[in-house]
Image (spheres, helix red, strand yellow):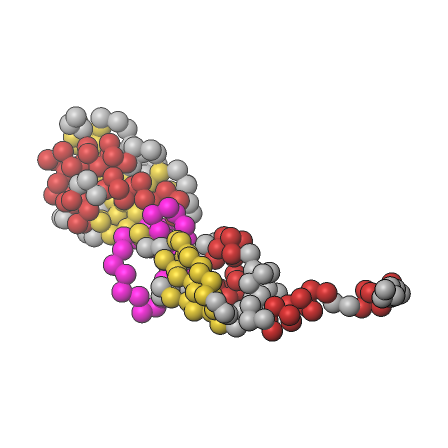
Amino acid sequence: MAAAVVLPLDKLKAIDVTAQADALMIAAGFGIDQVNVSGQHYTADSDVFDALDLPNVKTFAAFDSDAALKRIERVPWVETAQITRIYPGTLDVVIRERTPAFVWTRGETNYLVDATGRTLGPMPAASTWNLPRVVGAGADGEAILMLSALRQYPRLERQYAYGERVAERRWRVVLKNGTALDLAADREIEGFQEIANAREVQAALTGSPMIIDVRTPGRIAMRPATSTSGPTASLTGAGMTSVASARQ
């Protein structure tokens, strides 16, 4: 019968069991020695490799694909990902990226944002994305509702220049000619409908810049947008004149 071998505690602590197990797995052909990443265009390869955490996970036995998948899908541009183990030592990662829905300008930086309100990252300088633009704090999380409402009125949509989120609660839509549409909070559809149905204000959509205020239900008021009080100026005390009743 073989004699039992007893090692002192300090020598047991010195043995890196995990490292030895990894070495054995690698020697047996179960080490991860190659990663193929495809489907990415805007997602940085380094972000995917960081999410895989391969410096700390060297074998298939130690690799938690579910946890790695969740980390990859937290990368801003990634919508979904698929990880496939290809023996003996390859990981195949297929990325499906998100689609930008609009450009959000914050300060001096333009960001691409998808339809869920997820900021994907700064817009590349050479970008060819032809997307609607919004500005202001909170615009990224609320823009898709306003833009969806605008899409129901093609004539207004064709004249759209950008939307400004005012005080993080309502929209001011600025048209290409400088006309501004002041919409009430949570009444984007109703506001666009009132403007689209009022013949008296149609000239302002392409003519001299005006400020059109539909914040009061059933009433449209407008005034010229002067050089000293442009589309983004406060309307307080501006002497707004009622020019049309909203048609239902």
Image quarter of the C terminus: top left
Residue 60 part of the magenta-drawn span:
no
Inspect this view and state whether residue 52 appears. Answer: yes
Q: Residue at x 36, y 55 (%)?
A: 98
Q: Quadrant of residue 100?
A: bottom left
Inspect this view and state whether residue 164 appears. Answer: no
Q: Is residue 187 above or below residue 128?
A: above
Q: Nearer the viewer, residue 219 or 192?
A: 192
Residue 135 part of the magenta-drawn span:
yes
12 displayed left or right of 112: right
What number of labels is visible? 0
Image quarter of the N terminus: bottom right
204 displayed left or right of 102: left
| Outermost residue toward the front in this view | 1
159 displayed left or right of 100: left
Q: Residue at x 50, y 70 (%)?
A: 89
Q: Position of residue 54 (x, y in %)?
A: 56, 66
Q: Nearer the viewer, residue 12 or 76?
A: 12
Q: Position of residue 188 (x, y in %)?
A: 28, 36
184 displayed left or right of 212: right
Q: Residue at x 36, y 57 (%)?
A: 96
Q: Nearer the viewer, residue 247 or 238?
A: 247
Q: Position of residue 99 (x, y in %)?
A: 32, 55
Q: Residue at x 25, y 39 (%)?
A: 149
Q: Position of residue 115 (x, y in %)?
A: 34, 47
Magenta span: 111-136
Q: Nearer the viewer, residue 53 or 66?
A: 66
